[in-house]
């Protein structure tokens, strides 16, 4: 960013030449500063400081009579120009403050965890202007124009334009329902703009439009951005301390941020006011005149902020661009006509542009390319029935048949399918009930307004490093169900403490006994856990099943009787992680630690298995999940995991009471679950393996570095495969929208696909069922479309492993699921070992499971699916054959 910062300094000195010596001192120069490149080398960090500290942010407020004002006292002022901007805003308060009541927050109801999506302002009578990228979160194009997207309950969301949301809510302002989305500028346009229509509210009356600037703006003329900045993650704003100082730790409320114009172009105005993500759609106002100079739409940290210029805004308003219909394409099935068997179905495509229609006729008999079908699926998702949650390329029941569009809708809307298009762009459309993962991904989210509060910055010291290490260590590899609980119990018996445990879920009487016995021996235990392990509410009894009784019912008693502490991790918007503290790691004193893919549950990942059962295992399959575990003795790895777990404990305590907990979404779950074919017994039982020596290992954690601490080493591991790659994972979360690349997860999928296509031996083993969370057919369809031989994909009941073996030399084991959140913003832990003996052991375990697995069936999916409903506090009608459960409970059953 150095060039941009130097330009900033040059503009600063042109406006304020009296600051020449002060700037020179900050840059560490003995002489003055003549311009951007005028006096030798400059420390880039000093430049960044000058850029950032000179742009203050002020709260919008209200006086005693409820009239809008600007609070000039409660602000961070750093630097002479920041003081100048404060003084200028004070001089122009009478001009700027009256505009505040015409600028509002675009609030959303019906999207869990997303209270608002951006800012907007009155551009014409009853018309709000905002950004295209804001409108696309809440609306999609349909045959009749635009419609609101579906919320978590399968119902359209609702919007309002709210001019309040001030610090302390001294004056709540007004809130007007948004009646409709009038226009969204096409994606190929450089103009990031959209228009919303407000409902008529008689008590409010007409709100006058903001005036729009005519002509250019002088470089020395102060501007201000008025909008609703939302907290940003360290990925967006690396200097979180500076952000907290400038914004006084308060977000999502109306702010006024002064600055200057940096550059003016025909389709762009660049300014240097301080903004964050929720500012999308803000008004860029000329302080002296109160005119709007631009519609803010984007920013680049410490470089520049961008806005749609006033000239374009005036043009759109004068032409009333929102009255022109969008380009809409839809396909309608032709009426059935008696015809010979070889005849093809005819599709009529109607294209509407500016009120004129054109008609094209095409046949479905012609096979379409994969790219064409995926493109059509993406388009259909945007302009098809409002109920659509996902659309993808799929295949019918006919072996070798051409691809088609598979569209997913909520279970409760599936009965409407006969009235929807049977084809689109000449491609057949098949409707199915959406999986739970598709419903979760369809819940639109705004990055800045929905960020987690994981503290990457607190983990930059060497003791938190996730770099690979090579040191003398010992590793005991073992498997569930054969040896899981027995080995875990032995680990606890040998523990001296203190034990730092990080766990997703703990259940079972035997688990409680194991922990209680260690505590009674004087072992200190500090537990950081997901809310799945949270103590039950008062009055709730523990379960009757001795295998699944809740351990957490004893937590408070253990706190009183022993050296036991626990912390439940806050999840969701601004929690430590997004949806699951999914890690399974326990660290003991002296360098020993246990790491696994399995929860502490006697009913699944840690079943009670004795030697007699193992002797009969090849005839009668053992109960419980297939999981991979290790117990390792490595001082460096243990210390790094311990440090992260302790920081999780500390950070969770800081976050726990900062905000009221969110209401958890609920799920309607079919009461009768489709039977899953029993797992065949293994051909052999693998005893634990002890390996020691000089071993290279790399710890993997998310959400560190927004998931890149996991994704980058995993990409390197996958790409290193030369001969074989064996991947055992319960499910892979495929894209619900072919046109949207989801970052980490899709990079990993792309790398895996390449190896499945090209390696001599590359195989993928998924889990049967997944309780409606995902559908293995989606994986199979995608691989088939990419030219992968789908005989390389199998599925096995009750496998919970998340492991990969490469070339028989390297192995990854751990808890990371392959979903967009699992590889990015949930807490998980895995390790890559560069050790042939360990790779050989887990490779043999894979072969045992591969031999007893079956293929992925591509038959029509007919079972009833779970369905998200909005919030736990809303009355929900429970249809026959369904039960209502919290989302976290359903997800834990998927992870059982």
Image (cartoon, rainbow, N blue to C red):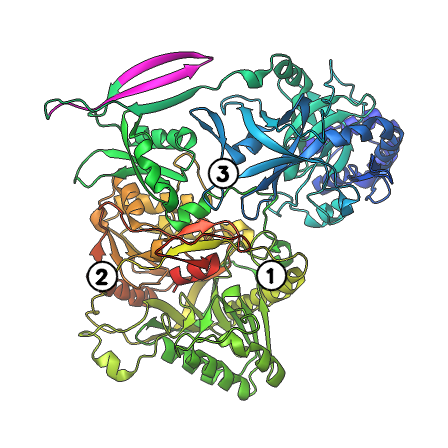
Question: Which comes before the other along the chain, label 1 or label 2?
Answer: 1
Percent x, y for residue 509? 43, 80
| Quarter location, residue 399 | top left
Q: Are marks 1 and 3 in contact (CB under 8 Å)?
A: no
Q: Nearer the viewer, residue 891 or 712?
A: 891
Question: Which comes before the other along the chain, label 1 or label 3?
Answer: 3
Q: Residue at x 59, y 29 (%)?
A: 131
As helix, strand or loop, the secondary structure at mark 1 comes to helix
- Decide: is 70 above or below 638: above
Q: Quadrant of the C terminus?
A: bottom left
Q: Which residues are magenta?
A: 342-361
Percent x, y for residue 757? 26, 43
Q: Could you tell me how far apart the alpha carbons at marks 2 and 3 are, in whole angstroms?
A: 38 Å
Q: Tell whether 23 sits left or right of 150.
A: right
Q: Are marks 2 and 3 in contact (CB under 8 Å)?
A: no
Q: Could you tell me how far apart the alpha carbons at marks 1 and 2 are, in whole angstroms?
A: 49 Å
| Dot in front, 1 or 3 | 3
Q: Nearer the viewer, residue 613 or 455?
A: 613
| Quarter location, residue 782 | top left
As helix, strand or loop, the secondary structure at mark 2 comes to loop
- Residue 410 makes an appearance in the image: no
Question: Which comes before the other along the chain, label 2 or label 3?
Answer: 3
> Which residue is labeled 3 in the image?
156
Please give the label number shown on residue 462: 1
Percent x, y for residue 832? 41, 60
Prevailing secondary structure class for the magenta stretch in the rendered image: strand
Is 350 covered by the magenta stretch?
yes
Q: Nearer the viewer, residue 35 or 274?
A: 274
Please give the label number shown on residue 677: 2
């Amino acid at each position: 960013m150095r060039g941009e910062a130097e330009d900033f300094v040059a503009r600063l000195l042109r406006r304020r030449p009296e600051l020449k010596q002060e700037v020179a001192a900050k840059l560490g120069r003995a002489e003055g500063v003549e311009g951007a490149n005028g006096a030798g080398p400059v420390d880039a960090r000093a430049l960044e400081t000058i850029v950032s500290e000179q742009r203050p942010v002020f709260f919008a407020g209200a006086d005693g009579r409820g009239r809008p004002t600007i609070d000039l006292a409660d602000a961070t002022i750093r630097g002479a120009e920041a003081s100048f901007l404060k003084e200028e805003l004070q001089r122009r308060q009478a001009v700027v403050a009256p505009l505040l009541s015409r600028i509002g927050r675009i609030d959303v109801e019906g999207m869990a965890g997303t209270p608002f999506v951006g800012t907007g302002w009155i551009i014409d009578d009853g018309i709000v202007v905002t950004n295209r990228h804001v409108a696309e979160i809440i609306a999609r194009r349909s045959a009749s124009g635009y419609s609101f997207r579906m919320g978590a309950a399968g119902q359209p969301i609702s919007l309002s334009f709210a001019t309040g949301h001030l610090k302390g809510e001294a004056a709540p302002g007004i809130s007007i329902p948004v009646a409709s989305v009038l226009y969204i500028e096409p994606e190929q346009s450089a103009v990031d703009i959209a228009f919303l229509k407000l409902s008529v509210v008689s008590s409010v009356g007409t709100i006058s439009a903001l005036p729009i600037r005519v002509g250019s703006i002088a470089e020395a003329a102060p501007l201000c951005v008025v909008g609703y900045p939302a907290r940003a993650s360290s990925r967006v704003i690396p200097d979180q301390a500076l952000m907290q100082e400038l914004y006084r730790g308060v977000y999502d409320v109306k702010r006024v941020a002064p600055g200057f114009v940096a550059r003016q172009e025909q389709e762009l105005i660049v300014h240097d006011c301080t903004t964050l993500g929720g500012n999308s759609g803000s008004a860029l106002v000329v302080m002296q005149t109160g005119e709007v100079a631009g519609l803010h739409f984007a920013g680049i940290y410490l470089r520049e902020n961008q806005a749609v210029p006033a000239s374009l805004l005036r043009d759109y308003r004068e032409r009333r661009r929102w009255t022109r219909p969008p380009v809409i394409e839809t396909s309608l099935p032709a009426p059935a006509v008696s015809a010979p068997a070889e005849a093809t179905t005819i599709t009529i495509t109607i294209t509407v542009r500016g009120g004129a229609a054109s008609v094209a006729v095409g046949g479905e008999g012609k096979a379409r390319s994969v790219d064409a079908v995926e493109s059509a699926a993406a388009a259909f998702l945007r302009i098809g029935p409002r109920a659509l949650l996902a659309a993808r390329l799929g295949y019918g029941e006919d072996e070798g048949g051409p691809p088609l569009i598979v569209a997913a809708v909520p279970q409760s809307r599936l009965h409407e399918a006969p009235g929807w298009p049977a084809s689109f762009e000449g491609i057949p459309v098949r409707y199915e009930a959406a999986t739970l993962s598709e419903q979760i991904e369809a819940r639109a989210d705004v990055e800045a307004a929905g960020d987690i509060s994981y503290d990457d910055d607190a983990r930059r010291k060497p003791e938190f490093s996730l770099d690979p290490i090579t040191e003398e260590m010992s590793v005991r590899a073992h498997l569930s169900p054969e040896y899981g609980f027995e080995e875990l119990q032995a680990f606890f018996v040998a523990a001296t403490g203190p034990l730092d445990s990080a766990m997703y879920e703990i259940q079972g009487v035997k688990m409680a006994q194991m922990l209680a016995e260690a505590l009674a021996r004087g072992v200190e235990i500090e537990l950081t856990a997901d809310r799945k392990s949270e103590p039950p509410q008062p009055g709730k009894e523990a379960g009757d099943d001795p295998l699944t009784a809740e351990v957490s019912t004893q937590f408070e008693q253990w706190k009183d009787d022993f050296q036991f502490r626990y912390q439940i991790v806050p999840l969701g918007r601004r929690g430590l992680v997004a949806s699951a503290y999914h890690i399974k790691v326990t660290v003991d004193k002296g360098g020993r630690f246990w790491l696994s893919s399995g929860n502490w549950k006697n009913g699944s990942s840690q079943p009670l298995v004795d030697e007699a059962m193992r002797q009969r295992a090849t005839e009668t399959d053992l109960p419980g999940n297939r999981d991979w575990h290790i117990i390792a003795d490595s001082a460096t790895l243990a210390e790094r995991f311990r440090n992260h777990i302790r920081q999780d404990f500390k950070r969770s305590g800081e976050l726990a009471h900062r905000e009221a907990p969110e209401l958890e979404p609920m799920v309607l779950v079919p009461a009768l679950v489709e039977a899953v074919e029993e797992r065949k017994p293994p051909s052999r039982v693998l005893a634990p393996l002890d390996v020691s020596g000089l071993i290279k290992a790399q710890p993997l954690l998310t959400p560190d570095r927004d998931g890149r601490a996991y994704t980058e080493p995993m990409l390197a591991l996958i790409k290193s495969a030369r001969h074989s790659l064996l991947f055992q994972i319960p499910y892979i979360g495929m894209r619900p929208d072919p046109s949207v690349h989801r970052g980490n997860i899709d990079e990993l999928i792309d790398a895996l696909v390449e190896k499945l296509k090209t390696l001599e031996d590359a195989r993928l083993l998924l889990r049967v069922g997944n309780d409606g969370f995902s559908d293995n057919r989606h994986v199979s369809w995608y691989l088939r479309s990419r030219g992968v031989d789908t005989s390389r994909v199998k599925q096995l009941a009750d496998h919970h492993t998340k492991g990969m073996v490469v070339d028989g030399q390297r192995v990854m084991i751990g808890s990371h699921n392959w979903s967009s959140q699992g590889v990015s913003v949930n807490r998980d832990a895995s390790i890559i070992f560069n050790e042939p003996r360990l790779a050989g052991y887990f490779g043999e375990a894979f072969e045992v499971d591969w031999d007893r697995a079956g293929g992925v069936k591509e038959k029509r999916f007919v079972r009833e699916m779970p369905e998200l409903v909005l919030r736990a506090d809303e009355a929900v009608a429970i249809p026959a054959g369904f039960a209502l459960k919290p989302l976290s409970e359903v997800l834990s059953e998927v992870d059982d």
